[in-house]
Image (spheres, helix red, strand yellow):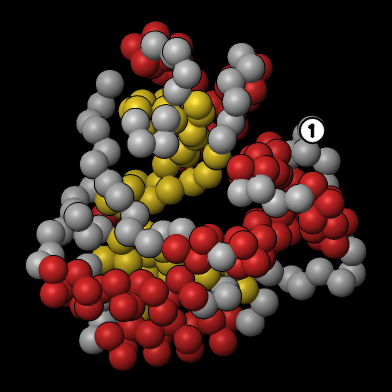
Amino acid sequence: MGRAYEYRKARKFKRWGMMAKTFTKIGKDIALAVKSGGPDPTSNGRLRAVIQNARAANMPKENVDRAIKRAVSKEQEDFKEITYEGYGPHGIAIVIETATDNINRTVANLRSYFTKSGGALGTSGMLDFMFDRKSVFRIPAGNIDLDELELEMIDFGADEISLDEEAEQIVIYGEFTAFGAIQKHLEEKGYELKQAEFERIPNDTKELSEEESADLEKLLERIEEDEDVLNVFHNMR
């Protein structure tokens, strides 16, 4: 079923290693989910997925409940989801997803990071042809038969299923628009959702030398440490 995604997002969740920043990111995800679909996870699939991700990150339930209450209160900042694109050192394409309450601050910071690294922040949509936006779900591998699961999920929009042996998880890729259908089926069938999110998968990757990779890593680190940044995707192999 389709091509295999040989893709690793280097450092995508580096700051998730720090608990406080992890919870800050999830808090923004909750605010955005509530804004788009309301505070009831029963009828808001996006919020339900964020809560699952919070649980996987060991975020206390009271923190999650507090974030939901804050999201519907007047205290909540008005976050806007904005995607930025550009080329880093050595021609690596980078897509950055942000949630910001100050667009001028965010774009100024990102432009500074790119410029100092020898790259350039570009225009919106310039890299759309280089990445496929996918729905991605992770469930425990257990004794699940991959072939049977593949046949089961194809009718709901899944187009790639692989085994992550290191994490002992099965990764299900689907079309961006199939997120709701895949999520609903997995929940109805009783599969334990470890993570559910959107990822941008590069159509082609570029290999760098060790020295060149180090140059790019410095830029990625600066970007990922920015409080407005949610996710970073690139096409370095």
| Residue at 25% across, 58% down | 235
Q: Is residue 162 above or below residue 117?
A: above
Percent x, y of residue 149:
42, 14
| Residue designated by label 1 | 42
Locate residue 6: give its quadrant.
top left
| Residue at 49% across, 75% down | 225
Q: Secondary structure at mark 1?
A: loop
Percent x, y of residue 115:
31, 89
Q: Is residue 27 above or below residue 53?
A: below
Locate residue 168: give its quadrant.
top left
In the depicted view, which residue is nearer to us: 133 or 152?
152
Query: Could one spot residue 208 in this view of the protein?
Result: yes
Percent x, y of residue 233:
37, 59
Q: Quadrant of the N terminus?
A: top left
Q: Is residue 104 above or below residue 1?
A: below
| Residue at 31% across, 90% down | 116
| Residue at 26% across, 66% down | 93
Query: Could one spot residue 97 in this view of the protein?
Result: no
Horizontal arrangement in the rendering, residue 52 relative to residue 93 (left or right): right
Q: Is residue 226 above or below residue 29?
A: below
Percent x, y of residue 230:
53, 63
Task: Tell which residue pokes out farthest to the left in this image.
Answer: 209
Horizontal arrangement in the rendering, residue 90 relative to residue 80 (left or right): left
Q: Quadrant of the C terminus?
A: bottom left
Marker count (numbered): 1
Q: Amino acid at mark 1?
A: Thr
Query: Badge 1, how many Cα within 10 Å: few under 14, some, many 20+?
Result: few
